[in-house]
Amino acid sequence: MPGFGSRSAPVSSLFVYCAGGYGKEVIEVARRYNALHGCWKAIHFLDDVCTEPARHEARIFAFDDACEHIGKHGGEVVIASGEPSLRATLRMKLQQRGLQLGRLVDATAIVSQPESLADGVVISQHCSVSRDARLGCNVSVNAMSIVGHDVVVGEDSVISSMVNIGGKTVIGRNTYIGMGALVKDQVRIGDGVIVGMGSVVFNDLPDNVIALGNPARPMRPNLEQRVFK
């Protein structure tokens, strides 16, 4: 299982795709996990725009160079973008080149069933993922968030820090749940939704809306499919 400590021998390298602010956090998660489990011989950045040779004590590879390195030596990739639409774009780019997505769980996180995590999932420090929750491909769960029992989160979605998601909630693909948001149990949140920071979601939200407030209400369509502008 990529990103977990059950291998008989470590994979050559883990590449953290995007060397920006969230990349700093993700590479620290990877280092803490690797110190305990020895999953990777080396941890690098992969970045499409950064021209620096290294950042945060990690070498930075351009995309084609990373593909060549993985082709020769093996390796896997996790995506460190907090933008759901960009996560989806980068995931498809990796898959088109046949690269393997890893899974990354901070050493301080509690995950009841690690096998329920799809490829590409990143879970940061002090998170809790309860029994029978399912996180789809390339989902990101940020620090100190709680994912309740039987929750389903669709691919490429981002759960920001200090979010609490009640049991049996279903969250769609490419959705962003902002910092400190609270989501009532058994709510359905659609695809391409942005829930603003500190919002409280009591009722279902349709696809492709920006929802804010307490209670959270759709304010306008999410036409641009971008959180950070």
Image: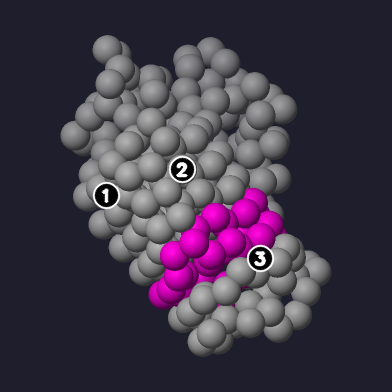
Where is mark 1, residue-wise? 109
Which quadrant holds the N terminus? top left
Residue 74 in the image: above or below residue 154:
above
The Cα atoms of the two marked residues, 1 and 2, are separated by 15 Å
| Residue stretch rendered in magenta on the structure | 169-197
Where is mark 2, residue-wise? 134
Q: Which dot, 2 or 3, sits closer to the camera?
A: 2
The three-letter amino acid code for the residue at tag 1 is Ala
The three-letter amino acid code for the residue at tag 3 is Val
Q: Position of residue 126 (x, y in %)?
A: 26, 57
Q: Nearer the viewer, residue 115 or 100?
A: 115
Q: Position of residue 31 (x, y in %)?
A: 29, 41
Query: Residue reaching furthest bottom?
Result: 214
Can residue 26 be found in the magenta stretch?
A: no
Which quadrant holds the C terminus? bottom right
The Cα atoms of the two marked residues, 2 and 3, are separated by 19 Å
Where is mark 3, residue-wise? 193
Q: How would you classify the magenta stretch by its main secondary structure? A: loop
Q: Residue 78: which numbered mark, if any?
A: none
Q: Position of residue 217 (x, y in %)?
A: 63, 82
Q: Nearer the viewer, residue 121 or 100?
A: 121
- Whichever of labels 1 and 3 marks the residue nearer the N terminus, that label is 1
- Whichever of labels 2 and 3 marks the residue nearer the N terminus, that label is 2
